[in-house]
Amino acid sequence: MPRECRPVHLSDPFPAPEPEPVAGCDVCAALAEQRAVAYSVGDRTTVIDRNVEMRRHPHARKAKS
Ligand SMILES: [Zn+2]
């Protein structure tokens, strides 16, 4: 009996796209900066942490210009 043995595609363990900092938001800007620093030192835990914070950071749906 044949086995369905297809190769599993393993690429990035964290496939979720990283959130973009919202323009004009100081909190997002600070999180993005901390994330960049964490990247530069290879601190993936902090990177993920900052991404979560950035995603959960509340924003008004429409920024007034
Ligand atoms: Zn923000």
Image: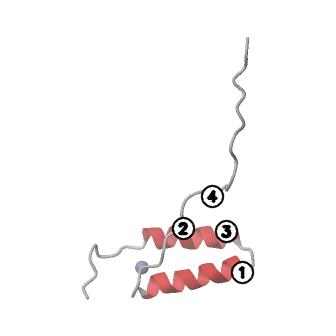
Residue 2 x/y as whole percent: 73, 15
Q: Secondary structure at mark 3?
A: helix
Please state which amino acid type lies under the numbered disc 3: Thr
Q: Is mark 1 within 8 Å of ligand 1?
A: no
Location of mark 2 (residue): 18
The answer to whether residue 8 is above or below residue 33 is above
Q: Which quadrant contains ligand 1?
A: bottom left
**Splitting the image into 4 quarters, where does residue 40 fall?**
bottom right
Few, some or many residues within 10 Å of mark 2 (<14, 14–19, 20+): some
Whichever of labels 1 and 4 marks the residue nearer the N terminus, that label is 4
Q: Where residue 45 is drawn, which disc sits there?
A: 3
Q: Secondary structure at mark 2?
A: loop
Q: Secondary structure at mark 1?
A: helix
Location of mark 4 (residue): 14
Few, some or many residues within 10 Å of mark 1 (<14, 14–19, 20+): few
Please state which amino acid type lies under the numbered disc 2: Glu
